[in-house]
Amino acid sequence: MITFAHVSIGTGGPVSCTLCAARRRASEPEPFTVGTVRERLSEACASWAHGPGPNVSFVRFEPFLHPALPEIVRIASDLGVQRIRLRTDGGALGASQNARGALSAGVRHVELVVLAAGAEHDELTERPGLFAALKAGSRAFIETAAAQGTTVALTGFVPVCSHNVTSAAGAVAALCEAGAVAVHVDAAACRPSEHAHVIAALDTAAANGVAGFVTGLDAAVPAPWDIAPAHEIGVERL
Amino acid sequence: MSTQLRVALVGISQPGYRSLALDYLEAACDDDRRLAEVTSVRLDLDTSIDPWWVAYRLARYEPAPDVIAMPVYCWTARRVYEAARVVKAVLPRTTIVLGGPEVGPIAEQVLEAQPAVDGVVTGEGEFAFAELLHAYTRGGDPGAVPGVVARVDGAIVRGPERAPVEELDTLPSPFRGRTHPTDGSAYVETYRGCPHRCAYCFEGKGSTRVRSYSWERIADDIAAVAGTPGMRSFSFIDPVFNLTSERLGRLADVLEPYARQGVRLHTIEVDIERIDAEAAVHLRRAGVASVETGPQSIGAAALAACNRSYDPECFAAGVAACREAGISVECDLIIGLPGDTVSDVVAGLDFAISLDPGRVQVSTLHVLPGTELWSRAAELGLTFDPEPPHEIIATRDIGFDELRRLEELGRASMAIYRARIDPTKESTL
């Protein structure tokens, strides 16, 4: 499978359940400096021994809020990174020239973080209008890439907790509708009694012809990309 | 039927392609002096076409066709059958003849299941079809034509067997003055048959014997296609382009002048394990831009069941040699082969991707008529859709739902693999 090194570009993002965050008393999101990210990128590329690559996924901070995103992507490209993935809330993808700019810089893969479908996503994130924005953003990314003849991938990330577990299947369905080719359900924060909902979410992906896989359960199904912790660099655990 | 036979040749192909089979049929009929009174029209359509629209187009011809001929493949069969039903209802006097790998091996079953169809050409169709038309023009018995199974007075009659064409040069070339190959979608063949006996494939038709055109004919056909104005790329339908080292070198000699003019060959099928640095140079000389190869599976049980061999080191070396020569490689994997487990499929995907070949193509097994898997399906524990395209439903080792999930995994992996920066095209901020 395709391995991505997870490279943190900050702390506290891109989006998570605010109810859980309130319980954890999480600090305000903060971007890392370009120097810090460059260091982590260099480390990831220098030690690359995981098949086709290097490939990186920028995580832990909303990339479109990072003031130096273009520079970070350019550094990755200059370091020879073949696959650049942004884990994003998708809200800014549809704005202005963001999709075009990301593609132009070398971003080929967007991973949308979705907690639930529709208004529930907005409520859990306390971001009114975010769900509609991410749908528009995913559409902009796919359509802009198609118009350019650029091959891209759209995938989804559904972090599941007790506040959204019953909505996980809806989140997966929304991602399938948005054009995701794979959905990663992170069930690490789930209780065993909630696992049936996680399985339902995976079945929703399968029924929509989309690859679904899960982490945080014992019986993980094969993943289209490898996110082994050994390849995660500078990632704080949820 | 009158001697003024009017024939409609109808090809339903994948979008962007044109039926080479019909080109050969057309050339054979044009070349047959007995068919001087036969006139033909040609309809080239793609699989997006509504079968009722096919029928509409055919029904609009004035006068109506006496004979409609359609090649059938597993992925076009449903459309062809539906079109045949509608055409027959509209033009009940029109004779409908089918041919191709989907119907040839199961001609009687097709005629039983498709009452609108009047005849099936069972093997190589050029001479059989010409003779069938000749039989129609003189009021002869179509059921007596070698290589044809026909409906005669309500009964299904199999004519004598027809051996494959021994001297391929006796087949009129479809390229010289007859067809106008289009850029990217033209195909040339240099031989028929296949040296392999892959159990899922119909190419060798149960034999490993290969019949080749002469080098003069090969050079002429290549010249006709490669020399077509505007031609930038074409391909070969040869099951193995690098059949032998000597043949590969000679093909490169023929193709090199066109390659120097910028003509490229795409998706050439090769035995990758026999490609070393020297063979890669020949491929490059020939203008090969991309090759297609296995491994189809890396599971020992599936390889044995499918009569295939696989050496991971030679395979990897072949991919590396091609990449070194600037040739993109497409590694093909088949999901649902007998003997493969879920782990085998995932390991195959892992292996293919680890080679960074350029492209990985994952497809689902189709149990095709006339193949070893078709005849041994029950023994091998294969459950497949009897209706075309005969997709695998479950195997002894992989259930229905697991197969579907593996298909999804394959699609997702391909998409993510392909979503990468292409250094030959990219610009940065």
Image (cartoon, coloured by chain):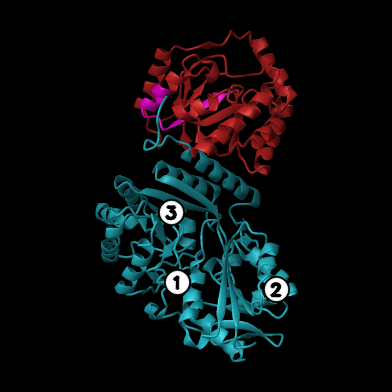
Chain colours: A red, B cyan
Residue sitting at x 55%, y 39% = A222
**Mark 2 belongs to chain:** B
**Mark 1 belongs to chain:** B
Q: Indicate the secondary structure of the residue bearing disc 2.
A: helix
Label 2, residues with CA under 10 Å away: few <14, some 14-19, many ≥20: few
Marks 1/3: CA distance?
37 Å
Q: In the current view of this chain or complex, which residue is farthest to the front?
A: B62
Residue identifier under label 1: B178
Name the kind of residue labelled 1 in the image.
Arg
Residue sitting at x 44%, y 67% = B197
- Confirm whether the magenta stretch covers residue A80: yes
Label 3, residues with CA under 10 Å away: few <14, some 14-19, many ≥20: many
Residue identifier under label 2: B113
Relative vertical location of residue B366 with respect to residue A117 in this rendering, above or below: below
Picture quarter with the C terminus of chain B: top left
Residue identifier under label 3: B295
- Confirm whether the magenta stretch covers residue B404: no
Over which residues does the magenta segment extend?
A: A74-88
Residue sitting at x 50%, y 84% = B162
Q: Indicate the secondary structure of the residue bearing disc 1.
A: loop
Name the kind of residue labelled 3 in the image.
Pro
Q: Position of residue A91 (x, y in %)?
A: 62, 22
Relative vertical location of residue B262 with respect to residue B169 in this rendering, above or below: above
User: In the rendered image, which quarter is residue A219 located in?
Assistant: top right
> Along the horizontal axis of the image, is B365 left or right of B287?
right
Name the kind of residue labelled 2 in the image.
Ala
Q: Nearer the viewer, residue B95 or A26?
A: B95
